[in-house]
Image (cartoon, grey):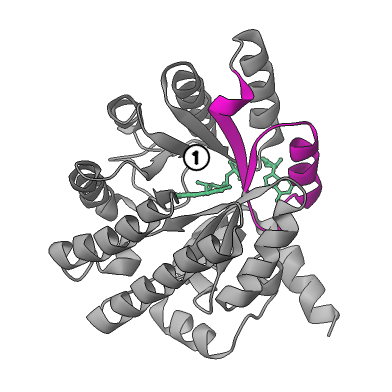
Amino acid sequence: MLKDLFIGLSQNQLLNSAAKKYGLKLGAQNVVAGTNVAETMQSIKELNAFGISCTVDNLGEFVFKKEEATAAKEQILEVVEAIHEHGVDAHISLKPSQLGLDIDYQFCLENLKEIIAKAANYDIFINFDMEDHGHLQPSFDMLDELSKDYNNIGTVIQAYFFRAEDDIQKYANYRLRIVKGAYKETEEYAYQDKKDIDKNYIELIEWHLLNGKFTSIATHDHNVINHVKQFVKENNIPNEKFEFQMLYGFRKDMQLQLAKEGYNFCTYVPFGNDWYGYFMRRLAERPQNLNLVVKQVFNK
Ligand code: FAD
């Protein structure tokens, strides 16, 4: 019920534009690293000091105008430059829709190419975040196209999709982030039952750990994390072959603990003023995250 409510809210364009005007509100400041590049670099340095690397996401959704996509591209290019200049341990996560996928395929491809080419010069990795089913195949198509010239790119496999097993095999030689999946998908394409999603999630992780290039296990689920720890031990999979990932501001103690135990750990660091959709999806995943909102309201 609550999940559907927050997913619905995350797709409300009117609220999204209103939120942009009012800065980080409702507790979003606990899970968004900053509104500009300078603040974000500072947050990254603080995480790096604990041996945690970062993947930086310039928040942005509902991009239907070329000027907005171009502005997003410029902002991401600025982040690439800043990562290089500051010498921080970080790479980029981006969403093809933010760079114009809903406007024009070729335009989006050119935007992506510019970012990837600049990042390649600095040896910075670019991850294509995966969005809802409507954006899935075109995003993979772009990855295929750009892979002809660049190898500093990878993507995400969402375990709720029936097709995830085929995709993970096709992209075995890529650095892949494996997640459960954050959007509302229909039974035509995706598992609906949490048990089925969790089962598929574990199977995909195990397969990629054994057969893939590099696996990013992106979850806050301690059961999955404990299972992976045991699995890599039993199968002699070295730490260099995988990392754990979590979102900025979530399970901070566990993030630090995993890094302390010697596992590669990467925090997903979102920044910018287009925080609304991202924040609503986090509330949908875990209504207890409403605590963040409540605390914020009462701390005023
Ligand atoms: P859940 O299934 O939400 O939770 C399982 C259990 O873990 C809970 O029952 C609870 O016991 C525990 N738990 C979970 N969260 C907490 C918490 N905050 N505090 C205490 N206990 C908790 N989705 C996409 O569709 N595309 C993407 O590109 C994408 N990228 C992502 C990148 C990262 C780094 C991460 C972490 C997630 C990403 N996601 C993405 C979201 C992902 O698909 C899931 O929706 C999200 O991670 C919630 O699932 P979960 O595996 O964390 O655990």
The residue positioned 37% from the left and 49% from the top of the image is 185
Q: Position of residue 24 (x, y in %)?
A: 63, 80
* Residue 13 included in the magenta stretch of the image: no
Q: Position of residue 50 (x, y in %)?
A: 77, 49
Q: For residue 264, say whether it is visible.
A: yes
Judging by the rendered image, the residue that carries numbered circle 1 is 180
Residue 262 on the magenta span: yes
SS of the residue under disc 1: loop
How many numbered callouts? 1
Q: Is residue 33 visible?
A: no
- The residue nearer to you, when weighing 81 against 70, is 81
Residue extending farthest to the right is: 299
Q: Establish if 267 lies above or below 110.
A: above
Q: Which residue shows up at 22% across the image and 48% down it?
A: 146
Which is more toward the observer, 37 or 121?
121
The boundaries of the magenta stretch are 238-266
Asked where in the image residue 158 lies, by quadrant, the reply is top left
188 to 270, vertically: above or below: above
Q: Is 279 situated left or right of 185 in this image?
A: right
Ligand 1 within 8 Å of disc 1? The answer is yes
Residues 204 and 262: in front is 262
Assign the C terminus to one quadrant of the image.
bottom right
What amino acid is found at the position of numbered circle 1 in the picture? Lys
In the rendered image, the quadrant that contains the N terminus is: bottom right
